[in-house]
Image: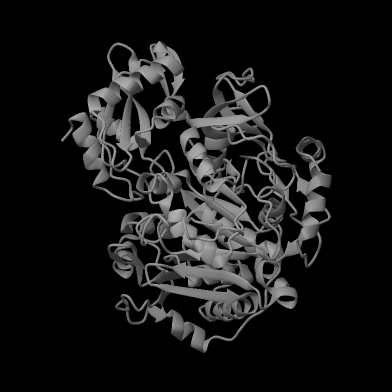
Amino acid sequence: MSYVPVFRRSVEDPDGFWREAAELISWDAPPETVLDTSDPNHPRWFADGRLNTCYNAVDRHVAARGDQPALIHDSPVTGSVTTLTYRELRDDVARFAGGLRSLGVTAGDRVIIYMPMVPEAAVAMLACARIGAVHSVVFGGFAPRELAVRIDDAAPKVLIAGSCGIEPSRVVEYMPIVNAALDMSEHQPDACIVLQRDTHPAELVDGRDQTWAQVMAAASPVDCVPVNGDDPLYILYTSGTTGLPKGVLRDNGGHAVALRWSMPNLYDTHPGEVFWAASDVGWVVGHSYIVYAPLLTGCTTIMYEGKPVGTPDAGAFWRVIADHGVNALFTAPTAFRAIKKEDARGEHLRGHDLSTFRVLYLAGERTDPDTYVWATNLLDRPVIDHWWQTETGWPIVSNPMGIEQLPIKPGSAAVPVPGWRVEVLDEQGAQRPAGEEGAIAIGLPLPPGALLTIYGDDDRYVNEYLTAYDGYYLTGDSGYIDSDGYVYVMGRTDDVINVAGHRLSTGAMEEVVAAHDAVAECAVIGVADDMKGQVPLGFVVLKSGEDIDHDDLRGELVQKVRDEVGPVAAFKDVRVVSKLPKTRSGKILRRTMRRIADGEQYTTPSTIEDPDALDTIRSAVGRV
């Protein structure tokens, strides 16, 4: 099997291609119509089929692999490892689904899940799917206002929360956040279910709260409820340009087919193997590749409650891989930059048996070539960058390892995944020539697994994603496609800066800066300039133990960018900082950094990992 004919068939015969892929899913009523495009803005996949996602992810595996581990929870912050077999997971999910039903939750009702990285989070998600309810997982630790906005938008019948989250240096109490959010929100759920953790049990509100243990003790198991293929499975909120989150709405049928197809074809991972996505269930990676895709495939999935460094050291990932026989790891480039910063020579790798480990997948932000080379040399295994979004639900661009391992080009996420017609367009909607940067757009209809719409606001979905170019979905990312068809995603469209009339990618400059031996990680932003409109400003974090003169480093980096990007970049300034501000999922907060540098008003994002990191930027640009 080779990539080109598979891709060609996916775009020339999508009906036949995805009908065949749907055979990997168990249907209560197989779909007669694969794709309905009567509304071109809202293609419906497998709409007349009936299925249950929980049955496909759990129940159907019990006969063949009931004693195989389905989920392994590895928690260095509590010093515990918990394993659930497929049979045990089925029993827990069926009972908790019965508990939800006893609280009045039925098909179509929404349930908000506000939990740390614990097995019960996955059980709650699957239990909702089991009875046709729509779950909305909110990242544990989000501030009260952010939670309140989501409560009002989703209007959940039940809210499920953990009593606390556990970080390496602190415990985050969740229920005070929940209580404050409910005080702010107009909508009030009928009940709250609280998972009491031994580390810090919560005070409960009489008449509203029940413990997880109480619900499970009183519940009776229930069977799976078949739903239509285009019935909603979940809402997942992602950041919006207006400041209000967007509720990405995902279906059951297309989601199950796409994710099941992706595991063997993109990730080269098969039933019985061990897959680890080092993310959080609150993000799309956690939904797709901690919970659903591995379980739909009959794999063992790892749920890790820890960090790449600090729990206890930069060897944490190697320990997990060795302890659980991980075959494939999926994480963010930030995680590997953190490991590289603490252990550039890979000394923590020694003594860990990585013989089962085949491949590393990176996504969530652009993988700079320096991190790619470092990880490749350290692991002596393929390192695969790939690109997708919360909205798409699964990869848009990747090296299709299970179809054909293509040559790797550092800096590129490789080629369009079958089903995704990726093009680079100019401002008028014409295709850019090979090698020229523009807006990355995807031809409609989007393949199965992509969002249906924005929950409760279809006009916003159409206006934000479908109106810029007729017949295309606008990704909001910029980049280019080279003469071999490889896609280079350089950054968000607002990361393209205009220097004296020249549109330049900050991502291209970051590539050059990150390649310096002394640099652990970096960010380049465009700041306002009276003469040129914008000029780039670099921020760098040095590797541990580096003792280079900052003026010398600045001179070297400026010259490197001048040499490799060109004088037109006007790259003349670099500031050394101790850390960069990031979201909890590892994305650098470039927009906030830009506002600080330009002296504009800004709001500290609720997703920020370390608010003190903003002080380093203010100090570096003299905005204290």
In the figure, 493 relative to 432: above or below? below
Residue 421, image x, y percentages: 69, 34
Closest to the observer, 513 or 180: 513
Taking the view exactly as shown, the residue that stands out farthest to the bottom is: 218
Left or right: residue 272 versus residue 602 is right
Residue 329, image x and y in percent?
56, 54
Taking 207 as reference, is 19 left or right? right
State whether residue 109 appears in this view.
no
Q: Quadrant of residue 537?
A: top left
Q: Residue at x 61, y 21 (%)?
A: 429
Question: Residue sitting at 81 percent across and 43 percent down?
Answer: 1
Res. 415 visible in picture = yes
Name the one closer to the observer, 513 or 443. Answer: 513
**On screen, residue 60 above or below 139:** below
Task: Name the residue: 45% across, 79% down.
Answer: 212
- List x then y, in percent, for residue 106: 59, 72
Q: Quadrant of the C terminus?
A: top left
Quadrant in the picture for residue 224: bottom right
- Front residue of 299/151: it is 299
Q: Nearer the viewer, residue 491 or 275?
A: 275
